Structures are given as structure tokens and as C-alpha cells.
Image (spheres, rainbow, N blue to C red):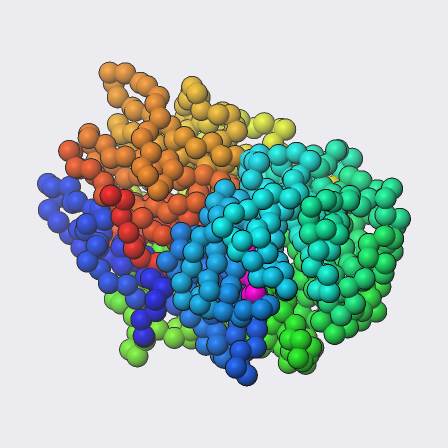
Amino acid sequence: MHKLTRCNVAVVMVLSAATILAGSAPAQVAKFDSDTISGLGARNIGSAAMSGRVAALAAVKEDGRLTVYVGAASGGVWKSINGGTTFKPVFDKESAQSIGAVTIDPQAPKTIWVGTGEAWTRNSTSIGTGIYKSTDGGDSWKNMGLANSERIAKIIVDPKNGNTVYACVPGKLWSDSEDRGVYKTTDGGKSWNKILKGANLSTGCSMISMSPQDPKILFAGMWDFRRKGWTFRSGGESPTAVSGSGFFQSTDGGLTWNELDEKSAKGLPAKPWGRVAVTIAPSKPNVVYALIESTRSALFRSEDDGNTWEERDRSNWMVWRPFYFANLIVDPKNENKVYKPDLTLIMSEDGGKSFSGIGGGAHGDFHDVWVNPDNTDHLIAGDDGGVWYSYDGGNSWWKGNNLPISQFYHVSTDNADPYHVFGGLQDNSVWMGDSQYPGGISNGRWENLFGGDGFWVFPDPTDANYVYAEAQGGYVGRINRITLEARAIKPQPNYGEGKLRFNWNTPIHLSPNEKGAIYIGAQFLFRSRDHGQSWDRISPDLTTNDPEKQKQEESGGVTVDNSYAANRRATARPSGRGRMTGICSSGATAARLGTMSSAVFRPSRRIPGFPGWKPVATILRRRMRRLIATRLETWMRTFTRRRTTAKRGLRSSRRIAGCAGMHTSSRKTPFFRTCCSLERNSDFGSRRMAAGIGRSTRGTSFRMSRFATWSCIRANPILSWPRTAAGFGSWTTLLRCADSRPK
């Protein structure tokens, strides 16, 4: 397989190095740090069959050929110069790989603007480092500012003056921030001015649109939103609570703005509102469409430049999950033909009065659509399964299987020779592939084993033909990977007990001491000794059981959005011999897993100084440091609790430049560590910086590699058998190698 400029590598190579070390003499603890693996080469093992979420698309005709740019939710920017037949990555050297917006200068097709930080704010979205510009078609990039924006939803370039650019910045997902709103530059990005700010510190820009005839005419949606570990709101805290969301129009290039609401623009719904999307019809700019989330969410159309509005479609796919699906695309030649990405792609040919689904055959969860202005039957669409192409107006779709932007939650390996790689993917099930194969590893060498959003997957150490695999919410199965026969083994509640509280990314763990034993955590820890056929509840409720944080059925703000993604009061991570278990818990409790078969979990006392709403991440051994990394709501410290018989104390660990909250090495007993910087949700990991796994011996410090495109790495680092699993808190295609180290 030819080398790519993108540094793709199987993490299993890292673990293979650990395998070699595992064979050393037991009297000496094997050194395992970045130096140990620094000589290993990188190779791409795929796969592009599953692909991953595409957040933004742009295309332009150049010299008779179609150039396409794809912005991946966590895989950077990819470029094709042949209409999508082949792609190459063009953004790998930049500090962020989560993309929110891609725009081509209408006057200069080699000038590309990219906004980093995905704007489809699900629980597992990543963040960016500002806005970037390329003047050579993506060969090189320059960061043009807005470094604290965290995510950018849309970029618009003035078609008459390429130095005038507008950026729509929703801002931070987990915390208040001044760095959100509509920004404008008139000098090509050298300086930026905020021209529209939100009503409060949680309100930013959700969408912006410009008239192609008069670039001074702008419409902008402003969105009040916030995610927490146990809930999410779009708009206010409830359907009737005050919200900072709004809808604005400017006729002077953003110098002044007029707010549009039910009082100033007849036909708009009553407030409060949630997310707002807006677009102007390119062929007839006096026609404007707006999708407004409210207690009566609907599509609205204006035929008089936004002065008056008429409610149009409010069917399910128009109004469902607006925080994740809030984009409108109008045919460049027909103002009555409108596309709305949602779970499926829907289209209207009567000005938004009615819609039909045209996304059949594609993956689903659409986010963006490009319509060829020269042939409007030619569509390119991006969804959670990659990029899709239609040449007949959406009646049929084709996928190239040539974008390796899969979003792995976790990966593991088995003991075969050559070994297999297993992984759980965001919205793309559980897969198994080869680590090597004669002639290279093709897409066909990857096999689907389990459904849902894929998470943990482990080969069964007692029978190589079986694997344990997990989908969201604790749906665990045991699968025969030869016949694909599967059996659901999820623990069930006792009679009359009510539902168990499993996390979106529920942890499972195989015992290193007892073959056939498996652990899984809800608010209780469960253990099975018969491959999941029966379960023993071996702990009390390890959470604080706060009823105020168990109202997922009410989550969503203006409109309800209820999923396992917001299930907070659950065990975060069961771990193996003598290690701690992290609890997604208000008050931060922890418990120890004993080494004997009769081990009992005992909740420890709450850790003083630890914020009550912070989840816990742990990976440690006995009489070692307990590292509790947090990453929600911009709480940028990492607490370290030293466990000794002499004294117990709590202090903040030193931060290493380039990785907020990275734990420095211990000068005592060897230990493993994780890096979790922040801004992440309840699936354990941070989003901003990458990390590595490592172990320090007495007197030896870490020189951990920084994984430029990983958000955070978590691991089961104490190897139970020659090869084991590594978990990744956020996103990457499979997978990337270290490209730099902290000095």
C-alpha cells in the first residue's frame, strides 16, 4: 500500500512493542515510553469502507475538472481533483483535525477557507483551533485567527471582494465564552471584528447567509446552547425558559443588525427559540428560508427579503434533532427546490410546502449537500458514513469507499499471527480487520461484526472464535466471528427495579485473572463468569444517584432530545487487578477491584476539592497515584491524589505545554497515565489535545509523543496478555502516529 502524507498507523503497532517488552525478565520492569516506539514506521491499514462523519463540503470547476474539498468531523480536509474518484489529505500538518466549515473563494478557486471545530454539537464532537486559509489549493495553510472560537459553522466570502470574509462562530459547547458570534475581516483575515454578539455568553452564531446579488445583505441565526455530562439544552433549560437564540438581518455588511421575530417580521413563531438555520435562494435572493426550532418548530419562507414569513413544512425530518441537523441548501437555479439534511436527505420542489425523502441507499445522518450549478441533478452529500454522489437528482446514490476517515472509539487486537484489529466506530458498528495481508489490506479485508454505534470490542481469551462487542447504552453481545452468530448479553434490572443507567460509551473489561470473567458497569458493577449468560451484581450503587441528573427524558431544551448520550449517573470505567474504577458521578466516588474472586466494591469517601459535576477517569495500580482527569465545562486543572500510608494530599499536577492537564511522571512506583485536557463529554476523553500511553520507572521521566490528530488516548495499559486493547476518547481514522514531541 502506498504511503500517504497523512500519518496513519495502527495503534496495534504500539501495542506490539508492548508485546515485545512483555517477554522481558519479570525481575525488571520493562521501560515503555515514546522512545521505545519512536523507531516504528507507520502504515495505513484502512479502512475506507466504513468512512466517517462529513461535516462540510465545497466544490468548484477548475480547468474542466471538478475539484472537491471534504471537511471531516475528525479527519481533517481531503481534496479530490477528479470529482471524487481519488482523494488526498491536505490538512494533516495543522493542529486541529475537526472541521466545521469549508469555503472556496468565488473569485479565486485556489483560495480555500477552513473553519475548525465541528458545529454539529453531539456528545462526541471535537473542537478546533480557529480559521485557516490556503492560497494554493490546500498545499499549505495559515492560521488566520479566531483561536478561541472552538467551532466554526459557516464561512462566507464576499463574491466581489475576496478580502471580505464572514465567520459564523457558535463557540464553546461546554462552557460560557465571549468568543462567539459573527466575525468579519476586510483584510483577508489579518484582523477580525465581532459584528454580531449573542444575548448571553452561551449564545453564538448557528448559520449565516449572504445575498449573491448584494453582498451587504446578510441573515444570521444566533443560538443559545449548552451541553453538560448529564443533559443538553438547545435554547433555554425548558420549552418555556428564556433563550438567547434569535434571528437577525443586516443590509450594510454587518454594520447594523435588525432582529426578526414574531413582532418585527410577521409570520415567525413565538419565542423562545432554539437553533436557527437560514439560507438565501441564489437564483432569486428575495426568497429566504429559515428553519427555526421552537415549541412549533418549522421551516419558514419569505418572498420579500425577510419582511414577512409563511410557515411551510414541519414534518418529522424537518424538525427532528435540530442541534444535529440544521442546514438548508437551495438549488442554484430553482428557488423552489430545497434540500434539508437530516437522518435522511429530504427535498422539496414546491418551495418548502412538502418534502420527500431522497436519501435511500445512503448511510444516513446527512449534514451537507453540494449542488452542481452546471447540472443540478449532480449532488454530492456528506453524512455519518462519508461522501455520496448522485447524478439523477437523488434517486440513486454511489459511494467511493476512498475516504479513510472512520471515527474509532476504541480498538483492540487478538493473539493471531498476523493479529487482527478490532474497533468500534461512531455510528458505524463494530469491525474486524487484518494487521497485514498479502498484497496489502483492502477494504474487503474488514468485516462487520456488530451493529449500532460501536464501542468496546475484545476477543474472548478463552475462545479465539468469539468476541465481545458493545453498542451504545450497554448493549453488549458475544459474537462468533466465523458464523457471525450473536447473542445479546446485556445485564438486566431486577424485577420492578426500573432501568439500569448505562453510559453512552459503557465500559466493559475482561478479567486478566480469570478466563471467561467479564465486567460491565452501569450504576452498579456487574460480573459474569460464564461469558455473559448470567451476571452477578458485585457492588452497591457507585454513583451519587442524584435524581436531578437523571432527567434524560427532559433533556433538549426547547425540544426534547433523549439518548444514552446524556446518561450520566453510570460507572465510567471498570478496571482490572488492583486498579481503581472511575465513576461518572457527582461527588466523585471511586471503588477498588480486589484480586480475589470474592472481591467486594467499597465506595471510597469523596475527594475534597473535586467539583461535584465532574466525571472521573482513572488508570492506576495499588499504592500508586490516583489520577482523576476531568474535561467538561473548561475546568482546565487535573487533580492528582497521592495514596501513601504517610499522608494523603490533593494537588494540581503540572501542565505540559501543548497538552492541558497532562500528568507528569512519577518518581516513585511505575505507573501508567492518561492525558485528558478538556471539553469532552461522558464517553471519557478530551477533545483538544492528544495524548499517549506510557509508564515511568523510578527516576525516569516521560517523553511522551504528542498525537497531533487524536483528541485523547486512554488505555488499558497494564497488559493482561501479549496484546490487549487501547481506548480512544475521541476520534481518528485508523490511526495516526506521533509526529512531534514536547520539548
> Bounds of the magenta span?
99-105
Pick the quarter of the image with the C terminus: top left
Q: Is residue 688 left or right of residue 495?
A: left
Q: Is residue 133 above or below residue 26?
A: below
Seen from the viewer's position, the closer of residues 347 and 553 is 347
Q: Is residue 511 above or below residue 175?
A: below
Asked if the magenta segment contains residue 302, the reply would be no
In this rendering, the answer to whether 450 lies above or below 256 is below
Image quadrant assignment for residue 576: top left
Q: Position of residue 636 (x, y in %)?
A: 43, 33
Residue found 44% across the figure and 24% down from its top: 610
* Residue drawn at point x = 67 percent, y = 62 percent: 341
Instruction: Give residue 3's quadrant in the image.
Output: bottom left
Q: Residue furthest top?
A: 646
Answer yes or no: is residue 294 visible: yes
Percent of width and height locating residue 586: 52, 28
Majority secondary structure of the magenta segment?
strand
Residue visible at 71% across and 41% down?
A: 245
Magenta span contains residue 103: yes
522 left or right, relative to 694: right
Identify which residue, 697 or 55, lies in the foreground.
Answer: 55
Q: Quadrant of residue 492?
A: top right
Instruction: Measuring from the top left, give residue 514's x and y in whole percent.
Output: 31, 45
Residue 740 drawn at (x, y percent): 28, 51
